[in-house]
Structures are given as structure tokens and as C-alpha cells.
Image (cartoon, rainbow, N blue to C red):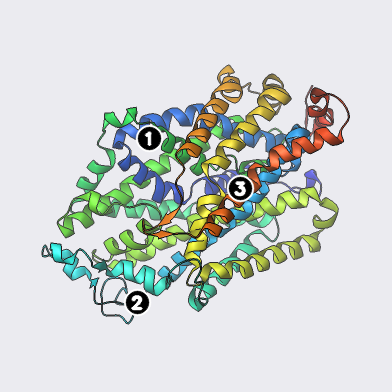
């Protein structure tokens, strides 16, 4: 660990930074969200809005956030304090959003439990001969035959019953939390223990863990890709995935979905890019890194589509139905459809183990970056309290233990309803778009796009194109504002499986989560203006001159 940055530390090498950053941005969104969005929104035609918005929104915002982190060498609250004190509320809003992101450890928990079950001689989601199955259960043998008639429309697959009745033990709603599922609780404990030992030493331990967790999923993805392409019916699935429907380009919703996926998969506006880049050397070429990391992310998403849809094509072929009858996204794809498909293959245990091991590693990377970002940000706010070696380990332990205890509510019988509520409201498009507008306002207008370009040139030796300034000042704020307004206009209440409607208090709680991060920005700005004497311009630039100083080996003028 290089201690030249003081007690804070830096990445031991450029390789560690690239691995941690790629592990963070390449996650579940690439595997279970992008392929389905592509199929649903025009196939190959979806790549047009996706590619265009990656260029005008994704890459410029990625560069902005990573450059802010590298320049200030701070977490996502204190970095905005240095860049633009008036917009420090952006950092506090991101701090609240990061707490909501903690819940994604639950996906790792589910995948770990599935991994344990994958070593059984008979995969439990392949048959209806289990204690949790109902009379309406439809096993794989029935599914594979072409005798599925209209009489069986009320049936459920064995994989669905395993997921809902055995793993989750789903109750009737969020009002009925029920008891803790002890197997899930043990998996939750194991996941938080692994997280603790991955980050307890800060970047020193995080960088070393990433050598395995960031690279091994690619090996598994390659194995699954080769296997998928050799299955019967695979190319029918790929046809559904990529066949272009150009009419969809006229659908505004398709463009909104593409933009949302860019924000989600690039980890934009959440503050994580700031924190990871803040451990870089001052002269690291974050300008070049930005292009390669964004390309890696989008390329992984595209390849993952072949892995997913080749298997969906095989599953549709075995059942004698079309691919659109089996295509799903999110948890439905990962925990119902894909396990069901692997159970139809020769050596089903091997392919199931491969898939869930990949899922776990993809989640681990993203999750420990989320937790490390939160801990770094709080430590940077109170360096005298939390930077000391022993205090740091104790602080990390307190965060992990308290999070484990809070997350026990998520592994109850009603836990899935809490998870879906936080997932839907904790970081909606409202949060993403609003934070994007605030970041661009802070850097492009208050701090100054030219001044920021000078900083990037000083750090990297390369001056960003004028195109980036146009994106920061005009294009990203305008597109984000349009998306923000459309979300509010088209807003629909969250429903589970299209039948369960939450009680009013749950929707109120959800909107409280959304507004708690969004309102931080205007509330902080109003507070600063009330407490600081001077004009608006003077307040916005207050203390900003302190950041124009020598950092590392560079001096910014």
C-alpha cells in the first residue's frame, strides 16, 4: 500500500484500480437486465439508442465522476465540498442512495443458497416430488412434453414453486413479515463475513480480492457462452435477441429504457466512481481509462445476451414454444428460468454451479464497492475518528454487523416485498436524473467546464474534447430533465407479480426514500445561502479556491 496519500492510502498498482472499477461496473445489470431490454425494445435496433446515449451521457458522466474523485482524492461528500460547496448536498444524497444499495447483498444470498442446492444429485427445482410442491406443480418432464394443454393454465412450474415456496417462503404481503428463514440468514451471515474480510483493510484488501472476483466471472461467462451456442434451438433464441424491429426506434419508452440502463450499468450518479478513482495517483490517465472501462461494460452486456438467449432458445425448443413465452429479466431470469433451463441439459449440476458461481462473483464485486464507498465517504468526513488503523477495522465491523442485523428483515417470509420496495424507490430514475443534473450544474456551470477541462489536462496530459463540455453543460442536463419529467408523468405504483398492491403506508415510505436523497441537494444549498454572507455567486464559489492547489505531483492554475 502506497502511503504517499497520507493515512488514506492508494491503489498498490494501476491494475488493482482497473480490476475494482471493472468489477463494480460489470454486474448483474449486464447479465439479467440488458439482454431482456434489448429483446423487448427492438432487438438489434435497441443498440442504436443504447450506443448513442452511451456516447452523449454515459462516457461524459463517467469521466466527470472519476475525474472529480481523482482530483479531490476524497469520498463523494467531501469531493463535492471541495469542488462546489453549494452542491455538497449531492454527496449527502448519494450517501443515502448507497445505504439503499446495501440490500443487493440479498441477491448474493439467494444465489449462494441455490449454489448449495446445486450439488444435490436431483436438482430440487426440476421435479414436483418435494414437500413444498402443490397439486398444481408442473415438473420438467411434463414441461418437456408437448401435452401442455389449456387445462393447465393455472399450473406453476417446479422452478417457480421452489423459488417462491422453498427459498422465499413468500407470505401474503409486506404486512405479514413472518419468521426468519434460517437458511437464508446463514447465507446472509456468510456474505457479510466475506464482505468484511474483503474491505476491512481498505483498498489494500479490496484490490487483492478483485484479482479473483473481477476476472473469474469472465471465464465462467466464456464457458456458458460456448455451451449455450452448441445447444439445439440456441440460434432461435439469438434471433429473438438481435432481430431488429426498427419501428421501436420511434417509441420514446425505448430511448428512456436505454438511458436508464446506461446509468444503471455504468454505476453513474451513485458516487462509487468518485470513491474508486479517489485512490488513484494524481497523474493517472483517467481520460483514457474512461473509454476502455465503458467499452468493457457495454461489450460484456452484449456478449451476456448471447449466453442468456442461447439458453432461452434451447428451453423454448425443449418445451415446443416460442422464445417470448420463456423470456424474463431480473430475479425471474436468474432464479426461475435459467435454473430450469440448466436442469434440462446433460450434467445439469455442473452448469447450474457455473451459473450461480458467476452470479455470486458479479454481486460480490459490486457489493463490496458499495460498502467500501460508504465507509470511505464517512471516514473522509471524520478522518480523525475513523482513519486510525484499529478504529477503521472496528468501524467496518460495526457497519457490517449492523447491516446484517437490519437485513434479517429481508430474509423473513415477507422480506421479498421489502426488497422490491427499496429496489423500486431507493434509486429510481428520479434519483439518477436529478443527481446527473446536479453534477453537471456543479461542474459545467458553477465550477466551470473550461476550468474542469484544465484540471483533466493537468492530471492526464490530454485535454477533453469540446464535445464533453457540450455534454456536461447542455446535453446531459436536458436529457435528464426530460426523463425526470416523463417518469413523474407516467409514474405507476409498484406491484408484485401484477397482483399484489402495497398498502398506502408502504408507498409513502417508498417516496420518503426517494425524496430523502433528492431533497438533500436543495435543502443543503438553501442552508448554505442562509448561513453564508454574500451574493449567490460568492456563496457558490466560497472555499472553492482552496481546491486550486498542488495535489500529488500536479499544480492546477
**Gap in Å between the C-alphas at discs 1 and 3?**
36 Å
Q: Secondary structure at mark 3?
A: helix
**Against 342, is 455 above or below?**
above
Q: Quadrant of residue 142?
A: bottom left
- Residue positioned 49% across, 52% down in the render: 215
Q: Is residue 211 visible?
A: no
Q: Quadrant of residue 170?
A: bottom left
**Residue lying farthest left?**
147
Residue 428: x %, y % from top left: 53, 45
Residue at label 1?
254
Q: Is residue 476 visible?
A: yes
Residue at label 2?
120
- Residue positioned 50% across, 26% down in the render: 56
Residue at label 3?
16
Q: Is residue 238 left or right of residue 443?
A: left
Closer-to-camera residue (9/509): 509
Q: Nearer the viewer, mark 2 or mark 3?
A: 2
> Which circle marks residue 320 in the picture?
none
Q: Is residue 176 left or right of residue 521?
A: left
Q: Residues within 10 Å of mark 2 (few under 14, many from 20)?
A: few
- Residue positioned 25% across, 44% down in the render: 238
Residue 296: x %, y % from top left: 47, 39
**Marks 1 and 3, the one that precedes in the sequence:** 3
CB contact under 8 Å: marks 1 and 3: no
Residue 301: x %, y % from top left: 41, 43
Q: Secondary structure at mark 2?
A: loop
**Marks 2 and 3, the one that precedes in the sequence:** 3
Q: Secondary structure at mark 1?
A: helix
Amino acid at each position: 500500500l502506497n502511503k504517499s496519500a497520507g493515512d488514506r492510502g492508494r491503489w498498490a498498482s494501476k491494475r488493482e484500480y482497473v480490476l475494482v472499477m471493472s468489477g463494480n461496473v460489470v454486474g448483474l445489470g449486464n447479465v439479467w437486465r440488458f439482454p431482456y431490454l434489448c429483446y423487448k425494445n427492438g432487438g438489434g435496433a435497441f443498440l442504436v439508442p443504447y450506443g448513442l446515449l452511451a456516447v452523449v451521457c454515459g462516457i461524459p458522466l463517467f469521466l466527470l465522476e472519476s475525474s472529480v474523485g481523482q482530483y479531490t482524492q476524497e469520498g463523494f461528500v467531501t469531493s463535492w465540498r471541495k469542488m462546489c460547496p453549494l452542491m455538497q448536498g449531492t454527496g449527502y444524497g448519494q450517501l443515502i442512495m448507497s445505504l439503499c444499495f446495501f440490500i443487493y447483498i440479498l441477491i448474493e444470498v439467494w444465489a449462494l443458497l441455490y449454489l448449495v442446492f446445486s450439488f444435490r444429485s436431483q436438482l430440487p427445482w426440476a421435479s414436483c416430488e418435494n414437500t413444498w410442491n402443490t397439486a398444481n406443480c408442473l415438473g420438467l418432464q411434463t414441461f418437456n412434453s408437448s401435452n401442455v394443454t389449456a387445462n393447465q393454465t393455472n399450473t406453476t412450474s417446479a422452478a417457480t414453486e421452489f423459488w417462491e415456496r422453498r427459498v422465499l417462503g413468500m407470505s401474503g404481503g409486506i404486512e405479514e413479515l413472518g419468521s426468519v428463514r434460517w437458511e437464508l440468514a446463514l447465507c446472509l451471515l456468510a456474505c457479510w463475513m466475506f464482505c468484511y474480510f474483503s474491505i476491512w483493510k481498505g483498498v489494500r484488501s479490496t484490490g487483492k480480492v478483485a484479482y479473483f472476483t473481477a476476472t473469474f466471472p469472465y471465464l465462467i461467462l466464456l464457458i456458458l457462452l460456448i455451451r449455450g451456442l452448441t445447444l439445439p434451438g440456441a440460434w432461435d433464441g439469438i434471433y429473438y435477441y438481435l432481430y431488429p424491429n426498427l419501428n421501436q426506434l420511434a417509441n420514446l419508452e425505448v430511448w428512456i429504457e436505454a438511458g436508464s440502463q446506461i446509468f444503471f450499468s455504468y454505476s453513474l450518479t451513485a458516487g462509487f466512481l468518485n470513491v474508486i478513482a479517489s485512490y488513484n495517483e494524481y497523474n493517472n490517465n483517467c481520460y483514457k481509462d474512461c473509454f476502455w472501462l465503458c467499452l468493457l461494460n457495454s461489450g460484456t452486456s452484449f456478449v451476456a445476451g448471447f449466453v442468456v438467449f442461447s439458453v432461452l432458445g434451447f428451453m423454448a425448443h425443449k418445451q415446443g414454444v416460442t422464445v417470448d413465452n420463456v423470456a424474463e429479466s431480473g430475479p425471474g431470469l436468474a432464479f426461475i428460468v435459467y435454473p430450469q433451463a440448466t436442469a434440462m441439459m446433460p450434467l445439469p449440476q455442473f452448469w447450474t454451479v457455473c451459473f450461480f458461481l458467476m452470479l455470486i462473483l458479479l454481486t460480490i464485486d459490486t457489493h463490496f464497492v458499495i460498502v467500501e464507498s460508504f465507509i470511505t465517504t464517512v471516514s473522509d468526513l471524520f478522518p480523525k475518528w475513523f482513519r486510525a488503523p484499529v478504529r477503521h477495522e472496528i468501524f467496518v465491523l460495526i457497519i457490517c454487523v449492523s447491516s446484517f442485523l437490519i437485513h434479517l428483515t429481508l430474509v423473513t417470509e415477507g422480506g421479498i416485498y421489502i426488497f422490491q420496495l427499496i429496489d423500486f424507490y431507493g434509486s429510481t430514475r428520479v434519483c439518477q436524473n436529478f443527481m446527473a443534473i446536479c453534477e453537471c450544474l456543479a461542474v459545467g456551470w458553477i465550477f466551470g467546464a473550461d476550468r474542469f477541462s484544465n484540471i483533466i489536462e493537468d492530471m492526464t496530459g490530454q485535454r477533453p474534447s469540446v464535445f464533453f463540455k457540450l455534454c456536461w453543460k447542455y446535453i446531459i442536463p436536458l436529457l435528464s430533465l426530460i426523463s425526470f419529467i416523463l417518469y413523474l408523468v407516467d409514474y405507476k405504483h409498484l406491484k408484485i407479480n401484477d397482483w399484489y398492491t402495497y398498502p398506502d403506508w408502504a408507498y409513502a415510505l417508498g417516496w420518503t426514500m426517494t425524496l430523502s436523497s433528492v431533497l438533500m441537494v436543495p435543502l443543503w444549498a438553501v442552508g448554505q445561502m442562509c448561513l453564508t454572507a454574500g451574493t449567490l455567486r460568492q456563496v457558490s464559489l466560497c472555499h472553492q479556491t482552496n481546491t486550486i492547489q498542488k495535489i500529488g505531483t500536479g499544480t492546477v492554475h
